[in-house]
Amino acid sequence: MTSMPARYLRKPVVVMAGMLLFFLPSPALSVEKSGQAMADAPPGQGRRLNDKEIEEAFEKIKTLQAGLDSASANIRQTKTNPILKKPLISEGTVLLKKPNLLRMEMKRPEHTITIVDGRVMWVFRPDTKEALKYVLSEQLMANQAVKFFSSAMNISLEELGKKFKVEMFEDAGVWVLDLTPKSGMAAKFLSKIRIYFKDGAPLPFKHEVIGKKGNLTVMEFSDTALNPATAPDAFTFTLPKDARITNTFDEEAPR
């Protein structure tokens, strides 16, 4: 079987980090104020919440997340792009545990395993026996991805407001968190991010990421389990003897 170049192996990390830049802190805090005269909500998003209602919604989510140490879910990711003839669909599972442990296994259309042990992120393709290794303290992109999944269990209005215009909508028991990049790295790649919560649920059931060039990534979570039983080696990766690390001399990823 022909070995796949490292730039293709890097895609799972790029996708995660690109989606989740908004969880990184920055110096200035400014949550967009909706004021008394609220504009109509975008089509299909329901009623726009005012500032007080947004704060109350976040407080409710934080209360629901109290005592949450780990979570697991099934994932279905759909990517559409103007240059693609049809959507790209991938499916798998994710398991995360505080503070910075993650295991994501995408099984279709190709098998990819991503494991974070708190210090190193591994992206492994069993079919080709190839792996990428990212030391989190050295690789910004990988570090961003891990920060997102950790923050998913401890969402913060304050941190979101540092990089995004934050709006929120309510429609039939669903909260839609609508984030528009203000500036910086996120604004170069993203037009908008939407995060969907069911009222009374501590974790989102869907993310939508809208890119600058009309591309859309939708990640849906199902069968979510809170504080599930976890195997002792769930976040441990040992490189098989017949596998190789393909980015040993990779200098492309930003530091």
Image: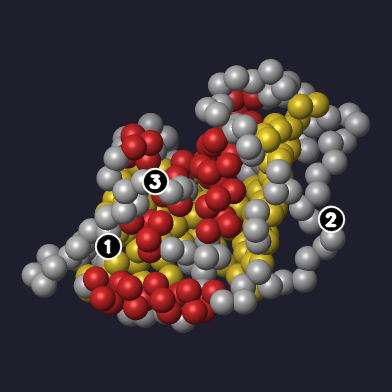
Residue bearing the label numbered 2: 233
Is 243 displayed left or right of 78 in the figure?
right
| Coordinates of residue 122 in the picture (x, y in percent) | 71, 39
Judge whether 15 appears above or below 231 on screen. above
Whether label 2 touches label 1, CB < 8 Å: no
Q: Amino acid at mark 2?
A: Asp
First in sequence: mark 2 or mark 1? 1
Q: Callout 3: helix, strand or loop?
A: loop
Measured as percent of width and height from the top left, residue 26 is found at 39, 46
Question: Is residue 24 or residue 102 the one in the foreground?
Answer: 24
Q: Residue at x 34, y 37 (%)?
A: 184
User: Where 133 falls versus 95 (above or below)?
Assistant: above
Towards the viewer: 177 or 134 = 134
Residue that badge 3 annotates: 26
Residue that label 1 marks: 167
Residues packed near mark 2 inside 10 Å, few (<14), some (14 to 19) or many (20 plus): few
Q: Secondary structure at mark 1?
A: strand
